[in-house]
Each structure stands twice: as C-alpha cells, then as structure tokens.
Amino acid sequence: MSHSNRLELVHNQGWDERILVCRNGELVDTFIVVTDNHVVLIDTVINPTTAAKMVEFAQPYLTGGRSLLVVNTHADYDHAWGNQLFVGAAARHAAPIIATRLCAERFAGPKDVETLAEFQAKEPAIFDEVKLTAPTLLFDQTLTIQGGDLSLELFATPGHTADHLSIYIPEIRTLLAADAAELPYPFARTVDGLPAMRASLAKLAALEADYVLYCHAPVTIGRQLLNDNLAYFDALEAHCRQWLAQSPAAPAADDVALIAQLGCPYDAITPQGSAWAHVAPYYRVQGHAAQIRMMLEHLQKK
C-alpha cells in the first residue's frame, strides 16, 4: 500500500457532533473530540503533515480557553508518527500526549526504529520528516480526561498490541475502540496477545455503547462489530479444538490447504453481508490462515 498525506473529514452520520472523524485514505480513521475544556486529538496519523491537518480541523474549536490534548491509542505508525508536532523543542503545537506506559516504551525499542527506516527507504516523501516521539503523560490501566461537558475514560485494551487503549465517553454512550476491533477481524501481534485481545473485545462489548467508532471499519457498522469479532474467534477456536482432538498430522504449510484441512473457510465463520464479502483477498486467505495458526499455537500451549 502506498501512503498519502491527504486527510479529510468524514461526513457525520449520526454520532455526536462534538466528535470529528478524520480519514487518511483507506488506511486509518482518527478522531477529534471537542469538549468544554479541551480539544482532544485521538492519534496523530502517519507523519507531521497529517498531524498538522488534524490541528487545522481542530483550530476553529480552540477558543474560549479550550486547551489542546493529544492521545495515542497505541504506537503503531498510522496512529503515532505525527507526535513530533506536539512534543519537543521544535513542536509547532505543544501539547501533552497521553498514552499507556507500554506505548512510550515502544518508542525506545529497536523494532520501531527499524520499521521507520524501512518506511523512509520506501517512501521518503511521506516519512523522511518523521522523528519517533514518545508520549509524555503516561498511565497503566485507566485515566479520565475531565472535559466539563464530556469525560473521556481511557482504559487499557491490550491484545492487538500490548500498549493499546480505547476511550469511552459515558455522557453520550460513545466508544472509540481504535484497533481493538476491526473489519473483518483484529490481529494480535503475539500468541500471548490472543486471549488478551478477546478479553478486551468482551470488555468493550459489555459497555453496550450507543455509538462505536473504529480506526479500521466503516463508521456506520456500529457496536455489532464487537460481537461479530468475538464470534469469529469463538468459531475459530471451536474448529481448532475439534481438529486438534482428532490427533491430526502437522498443520499444512500452505494457507489454502490449512483452511481446507480444518474445514474452516472465511465465509463459514464470518457474518453475511456486503461489508464482510468485499474485504481484500488477503483477509479471506493469508490473514485468516494466520489467525488459524495463532489459535492452534495458543491452544497447544494451554
């Protein structure tokens, strides 16, 4: 996938007008929440240019004494590589960046440094200006931003990544799930992250929010996606348990063969409907097979 500096506002389709949805092509949605006391940017997109566009969208609301706050839902490149716009001596819009402690630790690790170097080599026009910049206001499990009219309840939802957080706004029963749920399914980065991810999904579903917005799903899909993601992993586990109980041979190395071996095609364990039917081929085969392998490994470790 090639990347773009384009960021646009998504037309409001029923959620509270104090929430703005920003879209970076087909890659990611980020959010701006306007409260009486603060304007809160949820994520900083892929570089300083896209982060600056978020500030441009927020600027009309930075009046009446409102202060600018920033939240990183996690440290992935499409969520936090615009951080330098807000932190450091050269920051053009100085503001605290709130995140989990584990999120800050990722910025100091070699993996993210290597990832940035790879992106800069492939797309220098997009990523050359990026400087990995850690969040500054850290918490472990929960933190609440008191906005006056709205309170933003930040809470850890590990699984997709260990550092992941989601945001619930109780006054308007709105959940910003970030990457904890996705269409057609979220990915855990590690086998140990799989049960944590399912637990986070269950926690989010239990909120029964009236509106749920995601970073990688249609804005109209609603809270049902949380239950659909849970059902996907439940069905995947059932197929894997049944197959393991038969004392089979080793799982097939080929993705298509593995899916057939378990009798677990994508269409059999995902909902009917156009949103699910029109996902990229990767999710139907390679991604689905990767989920099967991770589930098998998890069950064999138990």
Image (cartoon, rainbow, N blue to C red):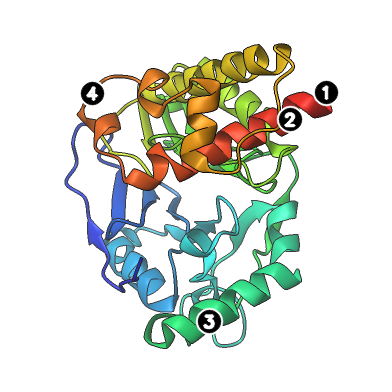
Q: Find numbered disc 4 in the image and state the secondary structure of the residue it sits on.
A: loop
Query: 299 or 148: nearer the eye?
Result: 299
Give the CA distance from mark 1 to mark 4.
Answer: 35 Å
Residue 91 is marked as 3
Can the viewer see residue 178 in this picture? no
Give the image quarter of residue 156.
Answer: top right
Residue 248 in view of the camera = yes
Where, by quadrant of the figure, is residue 13 drawn? top left
The residue under label 4 is 273
Residue at figure coordinates x 50%, y 77% from the top left: 119
Q: Compared to 71, does 264 lie above or below?
A: above
Circle 1 residue? 302
Instruction: Look at the picture and state if 199 lies above or below 69.
Output: above
The kind of residue tagged 3 is Ala
Q: Secondary structure at mark 3?
A: loop
Dot 2 corresponds to which residue? 298
Q: Is residue 25 left or right of residue 90?
A: left
Of mark 1 and mark 4, the one earlier in the sequence is: 4
Distance, label 3 to label 2, CA atoms, is 43 Å
Dot in front, 3 or 4: 4
Q: Viewer-proximal residue, 230 or 295?
A: 295
Q: Quick one: SS at disc 1?
A: loop
